[in-house]
Image (tube, rainbow, N blue to C red):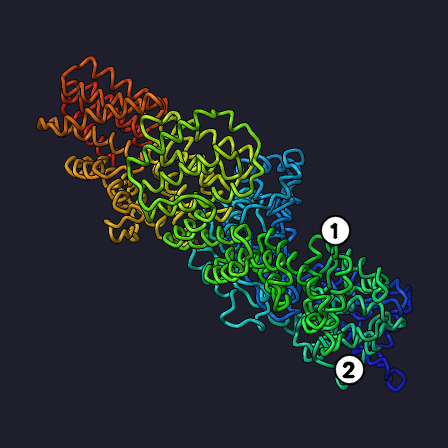
Amino acid sequence: MLSRARGDFDKADTQTDSPIQVVAQKMQTLGKIPVSVCHMTQNLLESGLKGVCEDLHLLLLDPDRFLFGNHNEAADDMRLLYRTDKLYGRDKEETLITNAFCRVSRGKSEAFFIGGFSGSGKSMLVDSLRNTVNAVGGYTIKHKFDAMSREEPLSGVISAFNQVCQMIKGTSKPVIAKRLKDEFGVDFSLLIRLLPSVSVLFPDFVSPAMRVEGGEAMNARSVCFTLLRFVRVVSSPRHPIMLFLDDMQWADSTALDVIHTILSDTMGSCMFFVGTYRDNEVQIDHDIFDLMERLDISGVQTTRVSLTGLNQDDLNTMISDALCLFPRICKSLSGIVFQKTKGNPFFVLEFMQSLKSRGLLQYNPLQKRWVWNEDIIRAEDITDNVLHLLSSKLNGLSGDVQMVLKVMACFGSSTNESVIGYLSESAEYAGVQNGLEGALRDGYIVKSGEGSLQFVHDKVREAAYNLIDDSKKKQFHYHLGQVLYQFCDGNDVGDIIFLTASQINHGKEWIIKDKDLTIGIAVLNMKAGKKALDGCDHKTAYSYLRFAMFLLPEDHWESNYDLSLRLNFLMASATNSCCQYDEAEQILRKGLSNARCLDDQLPSYLLMSQIFQAQGKVNDVYDTCSSILIQLGESIPESSTLKTSSGMIQETLNMYKEVGDKWLEGEKTDDKTLNTTLQFYRAIALASFFGKSHSHVVYFTCKAVQLSLQRGLCECTPLTLMQFTTSATTDENAVLCYRIAKNALCLQERFGVAAQIPELYNNFYCTIAWRFESFQEGVIRLRQGFEAGLSFGQIEQGLHCLCNRIKLAIGSGANLKSTLKEIDYYLHLLKTYKSMIATNAMLCFRETLSLLIDKGEATSIEEKAAFGDLNGKAYNLRVMSLYHKVIRAFWSGYTEQCQYYSEKYMSVSLEEVRFLNKSQVEFYHGLNSIEKLRVQKVVKCQEAVRKSIAAMRFAAAHSDWNYTNKLYLLEAEQQSLRDDHAHAIRMYDASIESARRSGFIHEQGLACEKAGFYYKRCGAVHNALHYFKHARECYEEWGSIMKVNLIQKEIDGLTVSC
């Protein structure tokens, strides 16, 4: 038996070499023949040519390893030469993940989940894709969740996306910068606040003040939406993003919601998400599996793999490479290693290193190869637990190295080098800097990125943490926190405040015993909570703030009043941002009951009114605001009539004209109460819209404007002015109200309060601007308002902008199929926001568009709007239903239905009708009445035509762009009734040209269609064909197959008659 081939170096003196071995040894001494050639010769002599083929293949494939490896090093310096660029035994998984990414690089997002035990090679599998991502111009970003910092999962995901802008280089940089500026325009400061590194793309454009702006509230949903918009801009098939989240067993639902939002996007995101987790540490109800299920429901392609240990052949290949020996020589050793490690790759590495360090695996300089004794290794009591193996290894390190490893283990998988620097300045941790150098040299810690230190593997961190006795771990954390606290106290240390608070909070039992320390630690946690709030990580903020509140003494409202008041409000804000409304209300009520004066209560009452508004409790909003306004010296009427409201509008307009527009050029007032009072007025006016009468709305908006006119400008003045013009505008005062509203927009821009944009744009473009500015401009601005609303957490205002945007898009003749695609995306998005009102509105629009496109033959869906009680006042469901029925009946050519529904709509009170809707319905009602007059002269229809023309003439006087084509078409149809041929033809052509100039392709087609029918009635077939063909072209561009088919029938009929 060839015992030396098996590595029995300790039996060399007692065994007799075989003749073949003697020959091999002699060949080795002649001319320094490589040992691998000797082994191959030995194999040839023993097994013949067949047995040497594998050896020869390896010699040719990797001569540096199997022919010359290890030959130039001293025996004491010999290293195990593992292939760092090779992933053993994962060929199938490598193919799966590569194919998945290739699909993403063609333009569609995907998810890839990898489960497996710690050390099974999950991260290495992901890292094997990096070169491919780089080759196609993609961006790889990564975050590793940590058991030690589980309170900050959302912050980690945000920080990963913050890395992207640092990676954008070359010609892509100005392109991405421009697209980000175009996308975020009005709410760009919010993006900067969430992702500060965006500023590297705008060194001149972004001011320092913009970077630190943090006054606007964001919640988890708004964070998701803002990141989604960012990813849409920076990712593309040419530059896909690969987001790698490691150790997802420590993630929570808030962080994973971000992933679901981006991956399920259907409007242009291009992201490859890879998530790894320890499948032996998660239960079936973990948020990871909920994410997988939601992605499946959303139609996102998802791949799941689970990594187990290497099989014996792959393990043998790994050891063969490490020892630079042919696989057949290492097979028996590999079998022992497999039994001990179960094939876990990381355990294998540590186990082999342990054999080497204990002398059980040695390099023999005479034989020029590694040798071992299988029997001794098999008999040795070597642990089969990698943690024990690492722990015993770490126990042999110097005290300084052990200390730095223990310190870093307390911080988590990674930390900043500056933290070690802070600690090294203290007497207790003076040796950590030297220890860090040793840990880096020995390979336990590596530098990753600028100033970042991390453990080479999770198991190393676990073993390092186990160096601390379990009974002393809390105290160790606490002492670390105390040392860091000395540096934080009075200094701006950035994110280190989170690390400090997390460490010192482990010592709760010692903190509460030290009365002199509790308040200081409470303040530390409050600062950490405030910083987390500013960074939009509300769950983390709540955790710190709750601990701060716990530390306060029982009499804290008496002994620490200011701190208690501030902390109470911050806790309520964090809870509200997490959508925990009941708890937020309870926190606020406790603070209100302990507040010493009205000024201290005002912020809490205002937040409470916002919480009520978010839950639809309009009566509670009204009662809260009216009570506070009375305490502020304002008057609340028991009732209000149309007469009194008209008088108040005129009084307010007269006051505005007296001070003039120059009033708006003044500076903000120092009157702090004014802004708060105006906010309560705005809230009660909105509550009155849903719960009281229109007269109440007018009263409160007028009072607010009058108050600002008397006391000066404040941050809330733009919203106050806009809310007033929304409720006060009539045909008679429209020009003045429009000027006031435009000034409100200019004032908002001057004050730079981007969070006001959703409400300002919604009110301006829906109720005022349609009279003066193009519908297309409103479509653009309302999209910005919608996105700003969702980004700032103003969901209701954002969704109002969305509904009005779609309405304007239809009115401006936007392509029906493109608009339908947008609506389907919005319906998908609304599942996250759970707004039945907005969902019903979108379903209504969808049904209307589906009918206009193809009568719903190929575009309809099963889900329909559920209006419930159409007679209910809330949200004007009856009016919405009538509006859509008018549109559908008119374009379908159902004259009687259109007449019935338009008359019903026109009879609705002005309080319930949006003026934009009314002008559109008036137009359709007039045209439809003319069709009825062609059949029978009805006085009611004649009056309807007269009113419609008068309304369009009045509207066209203010907005030639939006209404002149409509006026001309009505006049053309009226003249056609009177048989005034010349006038009718002139008006038809004028309407067609006006619609073309304004970009209203649908109304251009409508005017052509009406002209075609007129010529057909006159018997001018060729002229009729000309206009019908033009109408068909317009309807094709509009995307209405239904109208194209109707016109084609007319064309076919006329062609036959010709």
455 left or right of 884 in image: right
Kind of residue at disc 2: Ile
Bin the neighbour count of mark 1 within 10 Å (Cα to Cα): few under 14, some 14-19, many 20 and up. Answer: few
Which quadrant of the figure has residue 921? top left
Which quadrant of the figure has residue 549? bottom right
The numbered dot on residue 377 is: 2
Between 699 and 878, the residue placed more toward the observer is 699
Residue 951, x across and y down, in percent: 26, 26
Between 224 and 423, the residue placed more toward the observer is 423
640 shown above or below 372:
above
The numbered dot on residue 450 is: 1
Bin the neighbour count of mark 2 within 10 Å (Cα to Cα): few under 14, some 14-19, many 20 and up. Answer: some
Which corner quadrant holds the C terminus? Answer: top left
| Numbered disc 1: secondary structure | loop
Q: Earlier in the sequence, mark 1 or mark 2?
A: 2
* Front tag of 1 and 2: 1
Residue 741, x across and y down, in percent: 43, 31
| Numbered disc 2: secondary structure | helix
Residue 173, x across and y down, in percent: 63, 37
734 shown above or below 70:
above
Q: Alpha carbon of mark 1 to alpha carbon of mark 2: how far?
A: 43 Å
Q: State whether residue 985 appears in this view.
A: yes
Which corner quadrant holds the N terminus? Answer: bottom right
